[in-house]
Image (tube, rainbow, N blue to C red):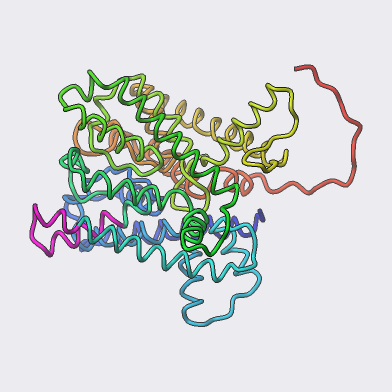
Amino acid sequence: MHTREIKIILTSFVVLILIGAFLLLLPISHRGVLSIVDALFTSTSAVCVTGLIVKNTPVDFTPFGQAIILLLIQIGGIGYMTAVTFMAVMLRQKLGHRDRMLLKESLNYPGIEGLVRFLKIVMTSILIIELFGAIILALRFWEDMPLGKSLWFGFFHSVSAFNNAGFSLFSDNLMRYSSDIVVNITIPFLVIVGGIGYIVVVEVYGLHKQKILRISTHTKIVLSSYIILIILGMILLLSLEWENAFASMEWWHKILASWFASVNYRTAGFNSVDFSTLSDANLFFGTFFMMTGGGPGGTAGGIKVTAVALAVLGMWYTLRGDSKVHIFGRSISTYQVNKAFSIILISSVYVVLSTVILSEIEKLPFLRMLFEVCSAFGTVGLSTGNGDVLSYSALFSDAGKINIMILMLMGRVGVFAFTVFIIGKAVESRIKYAEGRIIL
């Protein structure tokens, strides 16, 4: 991981956010009053595919403004450098070594060989999947609105879901469709496919088409982690909310609502239930799910499921007295395990510090602020709300909103990359010291 490439990628996100905020401030983009901070917050939330809102998207933004938000979601989801590089490839421009290194970092691709071919497959897959989702959602929305409007709503929600953004053109997000089978299957499908990472999607497709004989250890870890986290999230939601937030629902509706919420903990941010009605216990457990995030190299943010999985494996084998970590018949290097622990520790420090700062600035209930902080850091977008249709962040001062914006950017770029950018990468020393023994 090179500091120069990280700096360029981080700068590209900041520039995109500033351009997006400028476009949203244009009179043609919004209705009523839109402050600079709120424009920056909306642009950051879109570019970092989070979904936290301080303005009502369908009410406070015009169709042109909504289109700007959707464009920011799409570019932010695939990555600005990825989008620019793909345009260069389509124009048959030759990529230099530096361009390939930037693309490698942007996509979290393991090497340079086959990178351009991988990029073409990724972009084609994104187009097909988003179009597929848009058609299904448009047909469903057509039952409730005119055809032209349903096409726009279907396309918007498909792009927002695949990019794990959570922005919606319904003021109540998707709560009106909490019992709808089509919406509760299509949206989670798009969220999962977009969040597991492009490498996983390409490998699974290649295995299905018998172009590869086996999937990598990375893909196995991501898929198994997703399954475990979604099931665990459903169990917690059902056990804690059966007679609470889900009390008025039929049993099948409760299962559907818990499925939808658990999937969206994976950094998506759509909600079919009012999260302000959830118990404190569920809000607390939700912070862990949101911080975990999704898979590397996709549209998800947060710590990433691979880092959490390696940390759990490292802890398990350490408790067993085994210094060698292995899974699925493959050994895991000590450096990767240590990096996973480092990411979790650094992330926890950022989240705790941000929550403490917000607590001092805003003087609001601590648990709800912690939930909002974890939602921003994980680029999730779920929120306990401001008492209306906006996120809890709408209650924050400008300083509090800036705090949340920094967390969203950090979660999207990656906490390890963000920290390396701040402190710089250490130069490997050729000096080897005698081993010291520490009592733990």
Q: Percent position (x, y) of residue 242?
A: 25, 21
Q: Nearer the viewer, residue 278 or 182?
A: 182
Q: Percent position (x, y) of residue 27?
A: 21, 61
Residue 20 quadrant: bottom left
Q: Is residue 328 above or below residue 213?
A: above
Check if residue 139 falls in the magenta segment: yes
Dominant secondary-structure state across the stretch colored magenta: helix
Q: Is residue 30 left or right of residue 43?
A: left
Q: Is residue 359 above or below residue 213?
A: above
In what quadrant of the picture does the C terminus appear? Answer: top right
Q: Nearer the viewer, residue 398 or 256?
A: 256
**Count of marks overlaid on the render:** 0
Check if residue 175 falls in the magenta segment: no
**Who's the residue at 66% across and 42% down the image?**
329
Residue 233 quadrant: top left
As drawn, which residue projects farthest toward the bottom? 92
Q: Percent position (x, y) of residue 264?
A: 35, 40
**Who's the residue at 20% across and 63% down the image?**
28
**Who's the residue at 74% across and 27% down the image?**
322
Magenta range:
138-158
Q: Percent position (x, y) of residue 402?
A: 41, 42
